[in-house]
Image: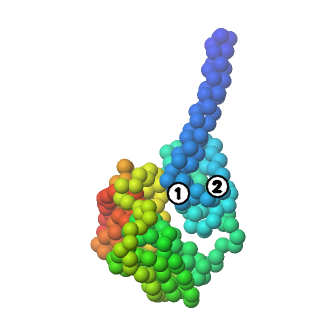
């Protein structure tokens, strides 16, 4: 009896050692996956973000440059295998713009353009005054110019858009292409953020799953037009190869 109890105690002790070791390895993999993701390497590379993880519970601390980076970091971590929860304590550098202010709208328009491959956020100047957005810069085609205005108009709070962009056939420097390799976790995060930033799709109930760049969307749409809008928004997100829209229409 004493031997059996001893063996039981030893087994329990070993189990206690094994579980934390496994959890530590998993936590390390979660942090590594986040750091290696396209979102963290490209969109959040200049932010001072610290990632702590214990048994799948992630805590984010540090300072970020843009307000939307806070949500982007969180949705990226949420999709990583093994993550159970995300405690987002990130703080914006300086004071955050007041909701619906011109500065707030400026940030939302820039973020909206940033996630889409058919427009160029880096070469598009955005000015906002009294809710009216003025776009300047160079567009590679008339279609790109019109699409940039369309995306800006669909940001909630924008009253009107004036486009002063010029159209030039000059080749773009380092243009993003549909062949650009972006990990599935990042594609899912960018797709979700794009839906949230667009006024036409922000309130639509959707779930997003990504496998090798193919995005499957499910959920509910109020009408066929709303369903088609979801497809249109996601289809133009960086890294998306194809969209399967399985949403039901109420």
Name the foreground residue: 5 vs 201. 201
Q: How is the image coloured?
A: rainbow
The residue at which mark 2 appears reads as 49
Name the foreground residue: 42 vs 57. 42
Residue pictured at 51% horizontal, 87% vertical: 132
Q: Position of residue 193 (x, y in %)?
A: 48, 65
The residue at which mark 1 appears reads as 42
Q: Is residue 223 above or below residue 130?
A: above
**Residue 4 appears in the figure:** yes
Q: Quadrant of residue 107?
A: bottom right
Q: Residue furthest right?
A: 94
Residue pictured at 54% horizontal, 82% vertical: 127
**Residue 23 appears in the figure:** no
Q: Quadrant of residue 117?
A: bottom left
Horizontal side of 86 relative to 233 (left or right) equals right
Of tags 2 and 1, which is closer to the observer?
A: 1
Q: Quadrant of residue 140?
A: bottom left
Q: Is residue 182 above or below residue 2?
A: below
Q: Earlier in the sequence, mark 2 or mark 1?
A: 1
Is the residue under label 1 in contact with that under label 2 (CB below 8 Å)?
no
Q: Is label 2 in a helix, a strand or a loop?
A: strand
Q: Position of residue 69 (x, y in %)?
A: 58, 63
Residue pictured at 38% horizontal, 79% vertical: 167
Q: Position of residue 172 (x, y in %)?
A: 41, 67
Q: Position of residue 20 (x, y in %)?
A: 63, 33
Q: Residue furthest left?
A: 224
């Amino acid at each position: 009896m004493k031997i059996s109890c001893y063996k039981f105690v030893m087994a329990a002790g070993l189990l206690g050692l094994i579980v934390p070791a496994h959890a530590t390895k998993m936590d390390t993999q979660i942090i590594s996956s986040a750091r290696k993701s396209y979102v963290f390497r490209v969109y959040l590379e200049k932010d001072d973000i610290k990632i702590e993880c214990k048994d799948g519970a992630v805590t984010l601390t540090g300072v970020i440059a843009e307000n939307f980076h806070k949500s982007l970091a969180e949705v990226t971590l949420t999709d990583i295998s093994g993550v159970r929860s995300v405690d987002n304590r990130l703080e914006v550098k300086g004071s955050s713009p007041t909701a619906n202010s011109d500065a707030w709208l400026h940030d939302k328009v820039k973020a909206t353009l940033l996630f889409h491959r058919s427009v160029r956020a880096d070469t598009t100047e955005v000015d906002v005054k009294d809710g009216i957005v003025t776009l300047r810069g160079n567009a590679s085609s008339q279609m790109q110019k019109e699409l940039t205005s369309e995306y800006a108009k669909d940001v909630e709070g924008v009253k009107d858009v004036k486009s002063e962009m010029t159209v030039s056939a000059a080749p773009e420097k380092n243009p993003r292409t549909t062949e650009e390799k972006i990990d599935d976790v990042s594609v899912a995060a960018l797709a979700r953020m794009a839906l949230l930033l667009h006024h036409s799709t922000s309130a639509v109930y959707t779930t997003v799953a990504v496998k090798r760049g193919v995005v499957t969307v499910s959920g509910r749409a109020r009408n066929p037009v709303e369903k088609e809008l979801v497809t249109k928004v996601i289809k133009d997100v960086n890294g998306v190869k194809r969209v399967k829209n399985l949403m039901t229409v109420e």
